[in-house]
Image: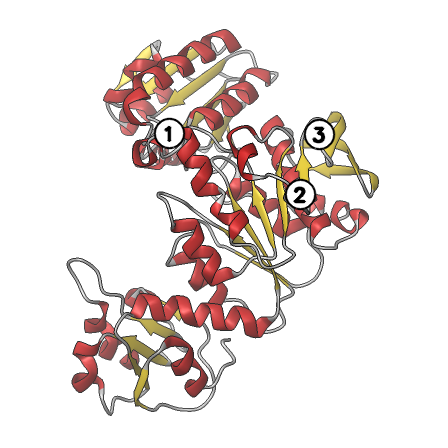
């Protein structure tokens, strides 16, 4: 519930009220007219080829609390049955209202970015933190998704955990202007979006916008080996490092049924965390989350007691069991050289008789994409992966054992060759569409009554 008066919302958005609706407050912000269930404030965003204001009258009929539309809809919506705000730029108004609500909440805000692991760190941190926590859902991490996340935070929220995506210079800075984070987490910097930014150094500079966007006295969490990020840290106070040799590190890792028991050493003492996962890269993600939790003022034992409640967003390392005893690691939301190596290392370390990797392309790697794909193929073979199946034309660079054109074909091939005890990793950039692989395997096994 966005508990601001209509007048305060109009002032924050720089909008004119041309129609008044009932009392109360909007439940949240919305941009998709098809998802109106009642009580939302709908923003009719203006795109290159469409103007969302054309749906404004319809969403009011569907029960929206009010609408925000561009100036071209003023005459049409004047006197409508509901609150109508007219503004030059509905997207900018969405962002300004989110900033106003963030300030009204007076919540602590933690912003998370990085080339790899930001969603997993967000998921882990949201589970570990005590108190009332509101976090980004799925991929609500852009100039549209982040303000919608803020506007969906209920009054009384103690901590906002916001994922921040980056595809170009200035985008993280734009998000920090909305969120005004007190704590920033940069998980790592790697060869992601190089096609758009030109170099890893440029990627690091773009991620470092989070540092400059921190609120006065803000704190920063970075890897112990910050790499290309190091030049941006300087003499910055309030920096916590995670990972080997850092302020927050894992000094002992013991596999347990369904996860791991990790002894974590910090400046605040040592604590044992029992996590529902054992992947080394997710243990590193957990260290980043613990560091952020400590920076937020939480006690170490307050964090550890919640470790068993961690769940991950869909398509990010999901473990699916198929009969007869086939494990599918469904990690196909995104991929780049860093995350590919981490996922393949995890697959190689599983105690399974045969390990199969179904790999789609790694997107946005720039002119060196062939080199990056070739190196991942070589890494897979060196790690001991038994069978590499490449999906799509670009992936021939993996030097795969088997090659198929489509995710559907990959699912069909797996259906023919899977054996009891197999472990299968499915991983590629989102544009590869590899979610189809696990979906089809699950559907086929359900039809046969063989889903564990």
Q: Is residue 106 left or right of residue 63?
A: right
Determine the secondary structure under disc 2.
Answer: strand
Determine the secondary structure under disc 1.
Answer: loop
Residue at the front extreme, as displayed: 235
Q: Is residue 352 left or right of residue 416?
A: right
Q: CA distance from mark 1 to mark 3?
A: 42 Å
Q: Dividing the picture into quarters, in which one does residue 108 lie?
A: bottom right
Q: Nearer the viewer, residue 356 or 137?
A: 137
Q: Which residue is mark 2?
A: 239
Q: CA distance from mark 2 to mark 3?
A: 35 Å
Specify whether residue 315 is in view: no
Q: Nearer the viewer, residue 97 or 414?
A: 97
Q: Is residue 42 left or right of residue 128?
A: left
Residue 199: which disc? Answer: 1
Q: Nearer the viewer, residue 177 or 37?
A: 177
Q: Nearer the viewer, residue 4 or 383?
A: 4
């Amino acid at each position: 519930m966005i508990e601001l008066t209509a007048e305060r919302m109009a002032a924050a958005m720089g909008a004119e009220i041309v129609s008044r609706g009932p009392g109360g407050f909007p439940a949240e912000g919305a941009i998709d007219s098809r998802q109106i269930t009642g009580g939302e404030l709908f923003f009719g965003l203006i795109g290159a080829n469409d103007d969302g204001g054309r749906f404004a009258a319809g969403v009011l009929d569907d029960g929206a609390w009010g609408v925000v539309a561009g100036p071209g809809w003023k005459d049409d919506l004047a006197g409508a049955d509901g609150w109508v705000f007219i503004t030059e730029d509905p997207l900018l108004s969405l962002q300004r209202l989110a900033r106003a609500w963030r300030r009204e909440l007076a919540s602590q805000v933690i912003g998370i970015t990085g080339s790899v692991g930001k969603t997993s760190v967000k998921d882990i941190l949201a589970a570990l933190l005590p108190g009332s926590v509101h976090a980004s859902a799925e991929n609500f991490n852009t100039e549209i998704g982040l303000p919608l996340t803020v506007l969906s935070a209920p009054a009384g929220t103690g901590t906002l955990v916001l994922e921040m995506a980056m595809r170009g210079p200035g985008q993280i800075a734009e998000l920090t202007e909305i969120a005004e984070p007190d704590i920033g987490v940069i998980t790592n910097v790697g060869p992601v979006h190089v096609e758009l930014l030109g170099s890893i150094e440029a990627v690091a500079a773009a991620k470092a916008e989070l540092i400059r966007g921190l609120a006065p006295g803000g704190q920063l969490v970075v890897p112990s080996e910050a790499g290309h990020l190091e030049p941006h840290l300087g003499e910055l106070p309030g920096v916590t490092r995670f990972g080997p040799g850092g302020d927050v590190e894992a000094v002992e890792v013991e596999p347990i049924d369904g996860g791991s028991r990790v002894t974590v050493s910090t400046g605040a003492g040592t604590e044992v965390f029992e996590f529902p996962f054992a992947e080394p890269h997710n243990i590193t993600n957990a260290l980043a989350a613990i560091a952020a939790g400590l920076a937020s003022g939480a006690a170490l034992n307050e964090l550890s007691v919640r470790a068993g409640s961690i769940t991950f967003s869909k398509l990010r390392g999901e473990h699916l069991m198929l009969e007869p005893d086939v494990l599918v690691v469904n990690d196909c939301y995104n991929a780049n050289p860093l995350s590919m190596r981490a996922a393949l290392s995890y697959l190689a370390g599983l105690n399974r008789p045969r390990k199969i990797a179904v790999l789609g392309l790694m997107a946005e790697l720039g002119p060196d994409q062939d080199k990056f794909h070739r190196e991942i193929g070589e890494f897979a073979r060196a790690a001991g992966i038994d069978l590499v199946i490449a999906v799509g034309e670009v992936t021939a660079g993996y030097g795969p054992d088997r090659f198929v054109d489509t995710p559907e074909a990959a699912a069909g091939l797996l259906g023919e060759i899977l054996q009891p005890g197999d472990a299968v990793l499915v991983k590629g950039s989102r544009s590869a569409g590899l979610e189809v692989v696990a979906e089809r395997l699950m559907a086929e096994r359900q039809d046969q009554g063989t889903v564990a």
